[in-house]
Amino acid sequence: MDFELKTLDLDGACADKCDALVVLLPEGFKPGRGELARLAAAALKAGDLEAKAGKQLQLYKTGGVSAPRVVLAGCGDASARAVRTAVQGAVGALKAAAVKRLTLCFAGAATGPAVRAAVQAAADASYVYTTTKPKADARKLRQVLVAVPDAAAVRDAFDHGVAAVKGIETAKEWGNRPPNHATPTHLADAAKALAKAPGISCEVLGPKEVAKLGMGSFMAVAQGSAEPLRFIVLRYNGGARADAPVVLVGKGITFDTGGISIKPAPEMDEMKFDMCGAASVLGVFSALAQLRPAVNVVGLIPACENMPDGRAIKPGDVVTSMSGQTIEILNTDAEGRLILCDALTYAERFKPRAVVDIATLTGACMIALGAVRSGLFASDDALAQALHAAGEQALDPCWRMPLDDDYGDGLKSNFADMGNVAGRAGGAITAAKFLQKFTAKMPWAHLDIAGTAWKGGAAKGATGRPVALLLDYIAGQAGEPKPARAPRKRK
Ligand code: BES
Ligand code: MN
Ligand code: ZN
């Protein structure tokens, strides 16, 4: 989708040739010149429209407006949150009309956060998945013009929003792809494609290299599948060479059957979304290519399937992780932590300023926090605060959960250094306690996105979360931006 930002008042937006015009009307709206401004003021006065976010009035072929469709949308106090609600509602209402070009006009003041929210909400509400449903492409919105009173004042926020959309759509794309179209090999190819951008590089390890590293826990999960595992290492170098990187680790289970501890059949298809952590890492890198913040970032993705098979791991098997710690696999469905632990040990070599893993890790987190906030666990208070603040700012919120040592008691095993599950109680926390055993040498945080990464039911699909949160966090770590280097010329 193409986004454009322009200084344009409501009267100017009325002259813009597009398929639909959305007018954001704040509380206390003061009509300027033009017919539509008068009409909006009249509707507000008559009570046919409220300026509250989410309230709207649709018009068709109205005099003095080039666009055939107009939505007058209340945007309340014009905060980022209210503008998001308004744009979601208005663009949602236009979805059936197959609008190609949309103009989004702020009829009042436009702050940076509000413009960013508008850009992201327009993309989110008009998103259509097309890869294995190409006919849906005809319904895609192609162009959005954002009209504001002063474009220069909100340019940076707009650019951040456009880059975030790119990242979120990359994450949605890979999350939504059917599991036979998003194998570990496919994910690795996607990562390699991202490395075509300047400043980004990618290395992909296969079963042989992973065995050599001693990733016995990751290999154990992969051994039940005919699809070979991949370990993806992405690097973005925007900072100085010596700057310690942020390391992101994304769970890349491209399908989770549960393995021998097999899951029940209903809704098992949704376990294609078990690589949404990995997809969020791919999303962040595609946005970084555009944003180019002055920071170093490493992305690690352990990717494999979790399948039942004659060669699959069994409850009771003991494996040796890359860290040297042994693990008794009591439940083969607690596989996410088994692949993440080796990736976290691998992360140590980068001497990271912070390592953040992102995983659809536990159904228990979904029960605890629902679909509103991701679960945040952290061994480092400053890191927890930074991630929490990034989530608030990006409207992609998370909530900190506890890591008291007592929660780890259930992981004790008579046959290994630890078991891979504790009891049912506090399942999101005990999973985090397991991961913590592999992160003692680094400031570490864990985002459990089981409840937030996708929606089920009629609106089934990936949300692209927590790409926006991660981008805000990374942007906050950056020093001065470094200009894009031109690709080196071949001799
Ligand atoms: N990928 C699942 C977690 C999950 C399940 C996320 C349902 C969203 C919806 C994970 O691998 C898993 O199966 N976790 C188990 C852990 C249990 C065996 C300790 C779970 O949550 O049931
Ligand atoms: Mn599982
Ligand atoms: Zn899983």
Image: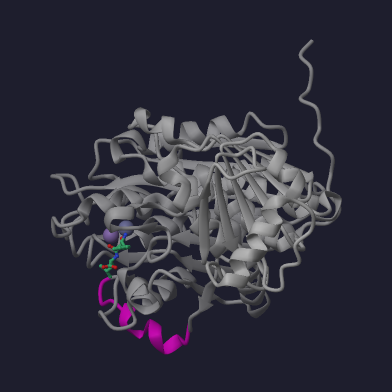
The segment highlighted magenta reads: 403-415
The N terminus lies in which quarter of the figure?
top right
Q: Position of residue 56 (x, y in %)?
A: 52, 62
401 vs 232, nearest the viewer: 401
- Residue 377 versus residue 16 in the image, above or below: below
Ligand 1, image quadrant it occupies: bottom left
Residue 186 visible to the viewer: yes
Q: Residue at x 65, y 77 (%)?
A: 385
The C terminus lies in which quarter of the figure?
top right
Q: Residue furthest top?
A: 491
Q: Is residue 54 left or right of residue 148?
A: left
Residue 51 visible to the viewer: no
Q: Position of residue 317 (x, y in %)?
A: 22, 60
Q: Residue at x 55, y 39 (%)?
A: 68
- Residue 31 versus residue 269 in the image, above or below: below
- Residue 335 versus residue 170 in the image, above or below: below
272 vs 119, nearest the viewer: 119
